[in-house]
């Protein structure tokens, strides 16, 4: 049975009536989104007391240097661990949208970086392969990823660790159990690792502000929290078949994303 045969059809008048009802819901969602954004901005700022250093294309850099003379810093926690041979497919899909927004964010006094634990050389090679120009730093020699809950030790994984502010994350549990579950296992294979190694790195983003030479952490989000910055999904949510639509071009990335079990 085709999608058209399964989906209801109707007249333009029926469509318009349904669309107007949907418009009410969309407007309510927009208002609620504005309220949530305000709550996000009103979170207390937490002063960063620890020194963090990163390897960048320009050499060693402190966290303050990543701001690049702007007052706001957004960091995407890109899943690319020291043992990975390639970046996480989902993170790769998200990062594909970074090049075009760097200048626009800079015009709003915001600098965007990707940060991963893999050595800089690996990141540079992968970045060149993808044709990316956005800044990407290695935190290999610092605790940055661990402190901001985007990386975990084997002990944390085995004992259970908070991710996305809770301990019942399904992907983390899969890594702790060494489960061959299809989503994490297939994603791990793309990165050249096993499930445990793959799931010790996690996706997320964190925001920082600098005032009077003092850096503050203002916000972090993980798992489904990064959907909003995943440009592909914002388009797919408006496509007739949504996120689950598939064509004959079932790339490795597209296939494994559907079964990743992100929460």
Image: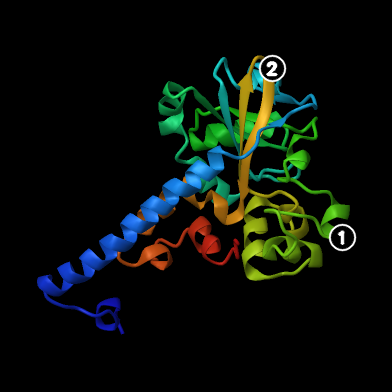
Secondary element at tag 1: helix
| Callout 1 touching callout 2 (CB < 8 Å) | no
Looking at the image, which residue sits at the far bottom?
1
Which dot, 1 or 2, sits closer to the camera? 1
Seen in the picture, residue 44 relative to 229 is either above or below; the reply is: above
Residue receiving disc 1: 159
Ranked by sequence position, the earlier of labels 1 and 2 is 2
Q: Is residue 230 visible?
A: no
Q: Which residue is mark 2?
A: 59
Q: Quadrant of the C terminus?
A: bottom right
Q: Residue at x 38, y 51 (%)?
A: 31
Position in image of residue 145 (x %, y %): 73, 39
Q: Position of residue 7 (x, y in %)?
A: 27, 79
Q: Position of residue 210 (x, y in %)?
A: 63, 22
Q: Name the residue nearer the viewer: 220 or 175.
A: 220
68 vs 244, left or right, is right
């Amino acid at each position: 049975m085709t999608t058209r045969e399964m989906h209801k059809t109707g007249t333009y008048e029926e469509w318009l009536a349904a669309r107007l009802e949907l418009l009410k819901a969309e407007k309510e969602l927009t208002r609620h989104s504005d309220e949530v954004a305000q709550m996000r901005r009103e979170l207390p700022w937490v002063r960063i007391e620890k020194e963090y250093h990163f390897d960048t294309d320009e050499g060693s850099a402190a966290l303050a240097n990543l701001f690049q003379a702007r007052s706001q810093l957004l960091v995407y926690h890109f899943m690319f661990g020291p043992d990975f041979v390639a970046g996480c497919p989902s993170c790769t899909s998200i990062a594909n949208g970074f090049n075009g927004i760097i200048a626009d964010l800079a015009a709003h006094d915001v600098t965007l970086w990707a940060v991963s634990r893999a050595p800089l050389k690996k990141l540079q090679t992968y970045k060149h392969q993808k044709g990316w120009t956005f800044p990407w730093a290695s935190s290999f020699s610092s605790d940055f990823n661990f402190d901001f809950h985007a990386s975990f030790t084997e002990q944390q994984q085995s004992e259970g660790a908070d991710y996305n502010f809770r301990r019942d994350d399904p992907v983390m549990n899969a890594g702790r159990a060494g489960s061959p579950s299809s989503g994490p296992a297939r994603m791990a294979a793309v990165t050249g690792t096993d499930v445990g190694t793959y799931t010790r790195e996690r996706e997320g983003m964190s925001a920082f502000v600098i005032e009077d030479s003092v850096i503050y952490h203002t916000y972090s989000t993980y798992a489904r929290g990064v959907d909003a910055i995943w440009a592909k999904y914002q388009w797919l949510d408006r496509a007739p078949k949504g996120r689950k639509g598939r064509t004959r071009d079932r790339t490795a990335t597209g296939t494994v994303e559907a079964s990743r079990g992100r929460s």
